[in-house]
Amino acid sequence: MFRPDGFLSLPCTVSTSSMGTLPKQVKIVEVGPRDGLQNEKNIVPTAVKIKLIDMLSEAGLPVIEATSFVSPKWVPQMADHTEVLKGIQKFPGINYPVLTPNFKGFEAAVAAGAKEVAIFGAASELFTRKNVNCSIEESFQRFDVILKAARAAGIAVRGYVSCVLGCPYEGKISPAKVVEVTKKLYSMGCYEISLGDTIGVGTPGVMKDMLSAVMHEVPLAALAVHCHDTYGQALANTLMALQMGVSVVDSSVAGLGGCPYAQGASGNLATEDLIYMLAGLGIHTGVNLQKLLEAGNFICQALNRKSSSKVAQATCKL
Amino acid sequence: MGNVPSAVKHCLSYQQLLREHLWIGDSVAGTLDPAQESSQLSGLPEYVKIVEVGPRDGLQNEKVIVPTDIKIEFINQLSQTGLSVIEVTSFVSSRWVPQMADHSEVMRGIHQYPGVRYPVLTPNLQGFHRAVAAGATEISVFGAASESFSKKNINCSIEESMGKFEEVVKSAKHMNIPVRGYVSCALGCPYEGSITPQKVTEVSKRLYGMGCYEISLGDTIGVGTPGSMKRMLESVMKEIPSGALAVHCHDTYGQALANILMALQMGINVVDSAVSGLGGCPYAKGASGNVATEDLVYMLNGLGLNTGVNLYKVMEAGDFICKAVNKTTNSKVAQASFNA
């Protein structure tokens, strides 16, 4: 799963934090081509998307979320989902999951060659209603259909839980609610659940509380964190998650994506900045930072925007 | 924004939502609600003192020369946010740092609020005397854990710089003026690369031993990560009480808040920051500088730690100075809160 080449050579001692032992390896789930681009204003041509994903594959990322089989009416950026999935190079050892919000999307994804899909739940009733026009319970029924079909076809399913540290409509979200939704998705057959701080409001204390609760009911190895950097808290929250033993982290090259709930705000945690921290901590990721920076540079030029990655900003000679 | 669902536009005023749920807002002792208290991490200090270095470290690295009256207004605004320490200026030669040429006018012009301290940098005895003449009642001296950095920055070896600082500290002690010591390059040097924790400890111990009441350990080029922060602090804390230590993290590689979290977990309770994340990095063109005070306060509020600082007032001061230097803020909290 992890490529041995290109590990950033920095002092390589695994340090033990005062809160527990950090994982020796972290799997990074690169969501730039989907979560990142989905929130970018400028529509990116299919060829550019394909090249981005190929460059990310070259950089050694073990999981790259390629696209979303959602209706182009809702998300125009993802209208070319089939062409993208068919057009990318599938490197051995790298997974290319795609989002499938409903059964129709799932069927289209399978037809286009998807071997792994992702479904999106939320720990907030209001958010679910506003986002997918149904209740949490109804969303589970829709997912059940997909999960059954996926199981029959031998396709792995990753579950997302949005709003785990706060909701733009409901405000505070109780850890108990996050546990309920996570547990349900896991028991329905999702191999991994990504816990998302969708609006980036979380801080390390609430991250810890939420994870403590979830870890009681769902195995640690099946958990991932997906932190948005809207308030600059993403890396600190991710560090806390690592200290709790989480070893799967979602991030987006160049910190792509804004936040639809806070105009002008930033979006995902930048993969480059995450890799920088993990490398400094002596944690193995298998990712080549230099090649990652090149991929980030490429997509930022295509989008005509500056990178949101501080590492990229510091490394790029203006 | 073409992809924004219409539902979002019906969303309650976002800022109001956040205020109501205490994610951002006042952090006043004793008014934490039970939900927030439960999110307090065990082992963290209850109170964190923030040392605001925007007017000095921040502005010093800004290209645009800021007029004296703007600097004064900026500091006056900061004085009303609840910040208890605001580094005003640097009594350095204007040949080296043109931005600080108006040090005496700024020092004399600001309103000194009761309960707020206004330290100034004094690189040598001459600067010290000027600072005192201008009304300074607290000063700082700047050492480095790197021989090369010391030579390039202040044109002398670490040993020679210690000699100069001893003169300053002696005079300051004589006049009952407290002295804060800075140690640059605590986690890495632009010339030497990695710096050993032992060297940082050695320099810190010197400064503490000669009479500095507090030592601010600076990740000058922002290369540190939580692991190197931990190793450095473990070494220094063997020789200097944690209550006399502060961390000064630059956000050049986006690591500042994670490094600060680690420092808090180690027992450090004094943190330097600059409103709006002012200041670039002279060693990495295009890179960002200091950690933004707004983002730091946001994290500390969320952790249930008391700072005494009003985040909204800090954001207003940040908005003021960004307009004055004609640049967008480096604070993510400010970016999220002010409509672009």
Image (tube, coloured by chain):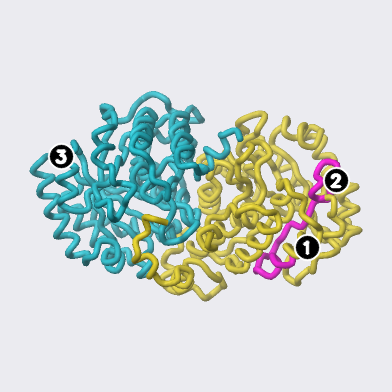
Chain colours: A cyan, B yellow
Q: CA distance from mark 1 to mark 2?
A: 18 Å
What residue range appears in magenta? B76-100
Name the subunit of mark 1.
B
**Residue wearing tag 2:** B94
Q: What is the chief secondary structure element of the magenta stretch?
A: loop
Q: Could you tell which of marks 1 and 2 lies nearer the N-terminus?
A: 1
Q: Position of residue A239 (x, y in %)?
A: 44, 48
Q: Amino acid at mark 1?
A: Ile
**Residue wearing tag 1:** B72
Structural crowding at the residue carrying mark 1, measured as other residues with C-alpha within 10 Å and reported as few (<14), some (14–19) or many (≥20): many
Q: Secondary structure at mark 1?
A: helix
Q: Secondary structure at mark 3?
A: helix
Q: Amino acid at mark 3?
A: Ala
Q: Position of residue B335 (x, y in %)?
A: 54, 57
Q: Position of residue A35 (x, y in %)?
A: 35, 48
- Determine if residue B116 is in view: yes
Question: Residue drawn 17% across and 47% down?
Answer: A106
Q: Closest to the observer: A61 or A96? A: A96
Which of the numbered marks, if any, corresponds to residue A111? 3
Q: Left of A131 or right of it: where is B278? A: right
Name the subunit of mark 3.
A
Q: Secondary structure at mark 2?
A: loop
Q: Amino acid at mark 2?
A: Ser
Q: Left of A262 or right of it: where is B92? A: right
Are the numbered discs 1 and 2 placed on the same chain, yes or no?
A: yes
Name the subunit of mark 2.
B
Q: Left of A78 or right of it: where is A314? A: right
Q: Closest to the observer: A34 or B223? A: A34
Q: CA distance from mark 2 to mark 3?
A: 69 Å
Q: Which corner quadrant holds the C terminus of chain A?
A: top right
Q: Look at the image and say whether residue B98 sits in the magenta stretch.
A: yes
